[in-house]
Image: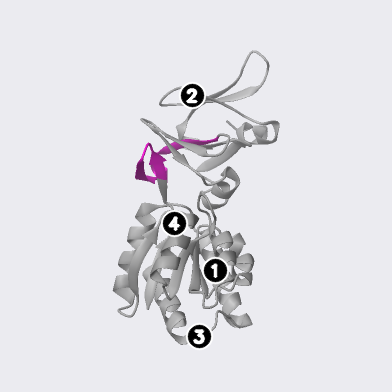
């Protein structure tokens, strides 16, 4: 079975390709793409049997690619790969065989490969669909441990223990450690769902801070509450809704 992996994260592409080589000798990764447009070109050229398709990609996202593939006479089977379980229903509406939640583990991928070998049509029964969504919720409930973040042209693996705060910008989120800054595209609202709520507090609609990184909390000359971070003395705004977090401090 010939496969293509489409994901804008090079580390994920490498990791998934390696895992596929471990769990199945019947699946041969023949190409990889960093965005939806490149994925379509590869699919047209290589005619794979299956595409592991990230949902959130630049250019065309995974759902848009799947929609275009559905117009093919013999489209490849689709496995969606994403960090967000809330796309599940829409993914299966696009005819997905399966839906993998990042970070992908070997045991779960083995089930996907088994499903690929036994499916001739991209359909799932109700019980299977329920099991997949249940697994997605389990993944979502586990606190985030590692981040894949960009700095320039490079991708870095950052342990969440090294993060001091997250700050939402216009189209991305800045990850600030005690000695550097990185960029991710995960919205702050999604980060808040996967970070340990006892370790990280969302103090503003645009800021999540690690509690242990807080040096002091004070009011500025306008009377607004501000958090100061220990390492670089960054001053972060606190919304009125978050004032209660500091009542006992």
- Location of the N terminus (image quadrant): bottom left
What label sits on residue 234 in the rendered view?
A: 2
Q: Nearer the viewer, residue 204 or 51?
A: 51
- Location of the C terminus (image quadrant): top right
208 is within the stretch colored magenta: no
What label sits on residue 38 in the rendered view?
A: 4
Magenta stretch in the rendered image: 149-168
Residue 156 shown left or right of residue 82 in the figure? left
Residue visible at 58% across and 74% down in the picture:
95
Which sits earlier in the primary sequence, circle 3 or circle 2?
A: 3
Cα gap from disc 4 to disc 3, whole angstroms? 26 Å
Helix, strand or loop at disc 4? helix
Task: Read off the residue under disc 3.
Answer: 120
Cα gap from disc 1 to disc 4, whole angstroms? 13 Å
Q: Nearer the viewer, mark 4 or mark 3?
A: 4
Which sits earlier in the primary sequence, circle 4 or circle 2?
A: 4
Task: Read off the residue under disc 1.
Answer: 69
Q: Nearer the viewer, mark 4 or mark 2?
A: 4
Mark 4, other Cα within 10 Å: few <14 / some 14–19 / many ≥20? some
Residue visible at 58% across and 80% down in the picture:
124
Identity of the residue furthest to the top in this view: 221
Tell me whether the residue at label 1 lies in contact with that at label 4, contact meaning CB atoms closer than 8 angstroms: no
Q: Nearer the viewer, mark 2 or mark 1?
A: 1
Tell me whether the residue at label 4 lies in contact with that at label 2, contact meaning CB atoms closer than 8 angstroms: no
Helix, strand or loop at disc 2? loop
């Amino acid at each position: 079975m010939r496969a293509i992996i489409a994901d804008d994260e090079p580390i994920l592409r490498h990791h998934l390709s390696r895992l596929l080589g471990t769990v199945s000798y019947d699946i041969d990764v023949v190409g990889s793409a960093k965005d939806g447009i490149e994925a379509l070109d590869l699919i047209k050229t290589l005619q794979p049997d299956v595409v592991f398709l990230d949902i959130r990609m630049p250019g065309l996202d995974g759902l848009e690619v799947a929609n275009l593939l559905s117009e093919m006479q013999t489209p490849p089977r689709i496995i969606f790969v994403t960090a967000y379980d809330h796309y599940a229903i829409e993914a299966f509406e696009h005819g997905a065989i399966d839906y993998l939640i990042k970070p992908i583990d070997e045991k779960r991928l083995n089930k996907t490969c088994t499903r690929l070998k036994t499916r001739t049509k991209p359909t799932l029964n109700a019980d299977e669909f329920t099991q997949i969504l249940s697994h997605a919720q389990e993944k979502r409930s586990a606190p985030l441990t590692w981040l894949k973040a960009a700095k320039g042209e490079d991708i870095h693996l950052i342990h969440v223990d090294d993060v001091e705060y997250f700050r939402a910008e216009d189209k991305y989120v800045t990850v600030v450690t005690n000695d550097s800054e990185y960029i991710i595209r995960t919205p702050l609202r999604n980060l808040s769902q996967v970070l340990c709520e006892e370790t990280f507090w969302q103090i503003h609609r645009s800021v999540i801070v690690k509690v242990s990184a807080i040096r002091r909390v004070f009011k500025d000359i306008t009377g607004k509450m501000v958090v100061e971070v220990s390492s670089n003395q960054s001053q972060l705004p606190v919304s009125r809704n978050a004032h209660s977090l500091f009542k006992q401090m």
